[in-house]
Image (tube, rainbow, N blue to C red):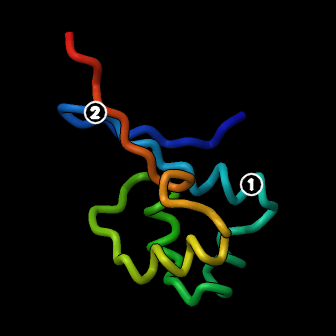
Amino acid sequence: MDKVTKVSTEKGEYHFKLEDLLEKKHISKNKLMRDTETDFKVIQRLAKGTITRVDIYVLARILEYLDCEMDDIIEYQKKENE
């Protein structure tokens, strides 16, 4: 089962997919924290969709470590026009 957290906004929906990606790559949040020197709270917020600001340097470290693109971690989908 996918571990994707969806957060709705007025005009779209964010899909936070870090937890799902970590599971697929068999990497724990603790390992990601240690290997990327990122605070655990930041990783947890990024995984749970409760993050309010993203530090591009932290994001770059995570993307490089996981060898992925940003939309593999956070995806935004606009709502269809009604």
Q: Count how many numbered circles sit on residues in the image.
A: 2
On residue 23, which mark appears? Answer: 1
On the picture, is 61 further left or further right than 15? right
Residue at x 52% of width, y 84% of height: 38
Residue at x 56% of width, y 70% of height: 63
On the picture, is 58 further left or further right than 50? right
What residue is disc 2 on? 12
- Label 2 element class: strand
- Figure quadrant of the N terminus: top right
The kind of residue tagged 1 is Glu
- Label 1 element class: helix
Which of the 4 image quarters holds residue 31?
bottom right
Residue at x 28% of width, y 68% of height: 53
Residue at x 20% of width, y 9% of height: 82
The kind of residue tagged 2 is Gly
Find the distance from the CA under tag 2 to the CA under tag 1. 26 Å
